[in-house]
């Protein structure tokens, strides 16, 4: 077996372990937290009082207008200067949640706006309150519009978690860096890490396509009602 292939075989368990213990949990927690934050921000943007609207718009503008790497550095390396200290994993999680929340808020807001006004009127005519109309009528329809871009955001987040390596979070890319530092074979290790990210993204893309097809089955074709 060539030495480079032996190195990849030897390092594979460590990379997979780092992915399962750190990369996957960081991705899932960041996306769930960011999705919840994005929903709140989107609802405030659409229905909240003006002071809160200005506040969440400023948050979205700030996060979407600055690089994620800079935000992570500010949280982990900058905030300790003012007495706010985070461990590496919580710092990375906070940074990713804020980033995902800003981007998903725009997706959710656009999806809600895309629901025809007649759906609101129909819900109110049935005696639903605003919260009931939102939960039973508007959000189910908006979710069909939001699923593709949200799935893309999730896949992008999987790859973005590699940035947590700069905060010393021992996720998959950080594991590759550490092995490369002792074996002096960065090309082999980084290509192996890239391949694992590629495989994970490929599986998620396949799942995204299945999910979209499932949603499409509940959508009536154009002209079906005529």
Image: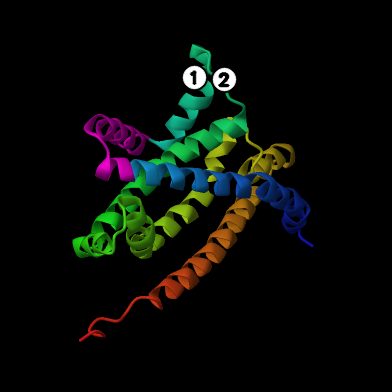
Residue found 63% across the figure and 35% down from its top: 169
How many numbered discs, if any?
Answer: 2
Is 38 or 13 nearer to us in this picture?
Answer: 38
Using the image, determine if residue 64 lies above or below residue 17: above
Q: CB of mark 1 within 8 Å of CB of mark 2?
A: yes
Query: Horizontally, is 27 left or right of 106 in the view?
Result: right
Residue 72, how many percent across, how many down? 48, 31
Is 20 or 42 nearer to us in this picture?
Answer: 42
Residue found 58% across the figure and 59% down from its top: 200
* Distance (Cα) linking label 1 and label 2: 6 Å
Specify the label residue 79 is tagged with.
Answer: 1
Residue 110, how many percent across, how many down? 28, 54
Specify the label residue 48 is tagged with.
Answer: none
Query: Horizontally, is 156 left or right of 226 in the view?
Result: right
Query: Horizontally, is 157 left or right of 170 in the view?
Result: left
Using the image, determine if residue 87 lies above or below residue 11: above
Which quadrant does the N terminus fall into? bottom right
- At numbered mark 2, what does the secondary structure look like: helix, strand or loop? loop
Q: What range of the chain is rendered magenta?
A: 43-66
Residue 153, how many percent across, how many down? 43, 53
The residue singled out by tag 2 in the image is 85
- At numbered mark 1, what does the secondary structure look like: helix, strand or loop? helix
Residue 76, how many percent across, how many down? 53, 25
Badge 1 or badge 2: first in the primary sequence: 1
Is 187 or 161 nearer to us in this picture?
Answer: 161
């Amino acid at each position: 077996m060539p030495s480079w292939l032996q190195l990849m075989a030897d390092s594979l368990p460590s990379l997979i372990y780092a992915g399962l213990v750190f990369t996957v949990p960081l991705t899932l927690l960041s996306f769930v937290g960011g999705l919840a934050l994005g929903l709140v921000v989107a609802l405030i943007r659409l229905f909240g009082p003006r002071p809160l609207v200005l506040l969440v718009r400023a948050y979205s503008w700030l996060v979407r207008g600055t690089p994620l790497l800079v935000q992570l550095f500010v949280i982990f390396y900058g905030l300790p200067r003012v007495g706010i200290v985070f461990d590496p994993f919580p710092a990375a999680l906070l940074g990713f949640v804020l980033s995902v929340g800003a981007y998903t808020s725009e997706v959710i807001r656009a999806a809600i706006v895309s629901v025809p006004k007649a759906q609101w009127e129909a819900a109110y005519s049935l005696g639903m309150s605003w919260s009931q109309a939102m939960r039973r009528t508007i959000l189910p329809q908006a979710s069909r519009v939001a699923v593709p871009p949200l799935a893309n955001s999730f896949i992008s987040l999987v790859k973005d978690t590699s940035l947590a390596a700069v905060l010393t979070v021992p996720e998959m890319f950080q594991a590759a860096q550490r092995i490369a530092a002792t074996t002096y074979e960065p090309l082999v290790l980084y290509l192996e890490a890239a391949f694992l990210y590629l495989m994970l993204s490929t599986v998620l893309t396949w799942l995204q396509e299945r999910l979209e097809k499932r949603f499409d089955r509940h959508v009536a074709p154009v002209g079906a009602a005529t």
